């Protein structure tokens, strides 16, 4: 989807910069980012925790505004780190409809697909409107009858998992109130097309194109050979009632986990908002799939 920049070009563009507070700061790359944005007279605000981390690494952040939580307004968000940082940034953006560009300071860089060396050219593309936006669906998570820390929204996946025991859990699944099956396994993953190349894939789930309007249910170490991944419409409402010998289980929402009591019912549905990812010229989904995942690569000589 092309972005209409007619209104943006009439004023300074506002950027909200997020970053990993755990990784070693790549001073050259961060300075390249800020230099590229300053060259276009951008209005830059930096997440307060990340600004503190940069200051500790002797990065000059003077003159930048800072913000906490989701208390920011921006035309673009920039995630500086790996894919985990990108997921946290997406959570902070929520329903703001702020397009996000991921700068890869990690290893895989599947979501964060802009390399530090590409930053000057990337900034030129943003300011000249030479980019497209890819719309990625989001999952909304709730627990029937209660509020739970860790619930909320997920760009990649939601999983219920065993905790503190070698015993598997039992997950009774309903799709749109119709009983589907009871999974006896170490866990069950519900993934978006974006998350289909993450935890679900490592458990044998299929790859789904981001444009697909689907969800995938993938068991983790199922106690049955015929319990295979199932793809359903993203209009479906998925309910999972979990029983466990340890009387509790983990709910993981894009890796953010919380403990719930057995008997809890987790409800997952498509969120009313999506996350828009900035895609630069030459960045194509199947190219990334081949390059990052070695998908369809024949290594035989």
Image (tube, rainbow, N blue to C red):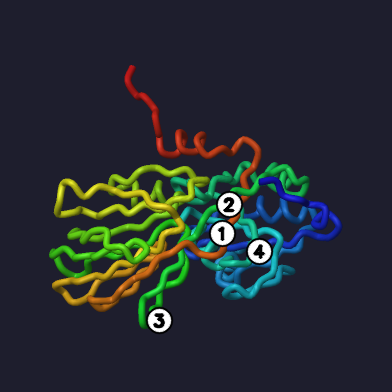
Location of residue 124 in the rendering, given as x and y in whole percent from the top left corner: 74, 45
Earlier sequence position, callout 3 versus callout 1: 3
Earlier sequence position, callout 2 versus callout 4: 4
Residue in the picture at 30% in, 52% down = 218
Tell me the tag on residue 16. 4
Earlier sequence position, callout 4 versus callout 3: 4
Q: Is residue 45 left or right of residue 249?
A: right
Residue identified by numbered label 3: 147
Q: Is residue 30 left or right of residue 167?
A: right
Q: Which sits in the foreground, 248 or 14?
A: 248
Asked where in the image residue 299 lies, by quadrant, the reply is top left
Q: Are marks 2 and 1 in contact (CB under 8 Å)?
A: yes
Residue in the picture at 44% in, 56% down = 156
Q: Which sits in the foreground, 279 or 224?
A: 224
Residue identified by numbered label 1: 274
Q: Is residue 224 left or right of residue 172?
A: left
Asked where in the image residue 301 lies, by quadrant, the reply is top left
């Amino acid at each position: 989807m092309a972005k209409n920049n007619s209104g943006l070009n009439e004023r300074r563009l506002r950027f909200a910069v997020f970053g990993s507070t755990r990784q070693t700061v790549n001073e050259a790359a961060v300075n390249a980012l800020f230099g590229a944005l300053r060259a276009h007279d951008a209005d830059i605000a930096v997440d307060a925790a990340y600004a503190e981390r940069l200051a500790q690494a002797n990065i000059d952040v003077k003159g930048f505004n800072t913000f906490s939580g989701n208390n920011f307004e921006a035309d673009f968000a920039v995630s500086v780190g790996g894919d985990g940082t990108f997921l946290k940034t997406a959570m902070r953006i929520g329903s703001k409809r702020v397009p996000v560009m991921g700068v890869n300071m990690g290893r895989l860089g599947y979501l964060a697909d802009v390399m530090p060396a590409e930053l000057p050219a990337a900034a030129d593309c943003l300011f000249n409107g030479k980019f497209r936006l890819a719309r990625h669906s989001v999952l909304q998570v709730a627990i029937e009858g209660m509020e739970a820390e860790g619930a909320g929204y997920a760009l990649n996946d939601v999983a219920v998992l065993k905790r503190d025991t070698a015993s598997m859990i039992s997950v009774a699944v309903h799709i749109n109130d119709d009983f589907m099956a009871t999974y006896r396994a170490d866990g069950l993953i519900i993934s978006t097309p974006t998350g289909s190349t993450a935890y679900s894939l490592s458990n044998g789930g299929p790859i789904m194109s981001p444009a697909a309007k689907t969800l995938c249910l993938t068991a983790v170490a199922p106690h049955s050979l015929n319990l295979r991944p199932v793809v359903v419409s993203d209009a479906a409402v998925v309910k999972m009632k979990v029983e466990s010998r340890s009387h509790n289980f983990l709910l993981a929402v894009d890796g953010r986990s919380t403990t719930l009591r057995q008997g809890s019912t987790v409800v997952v549905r498509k969120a009313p908002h999506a996350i828009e990812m900035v895609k630069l010229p030459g960045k194509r989904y199947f190219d990334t799939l081949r390059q990052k995942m070695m998908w369809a690569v024949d290594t035989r000589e």
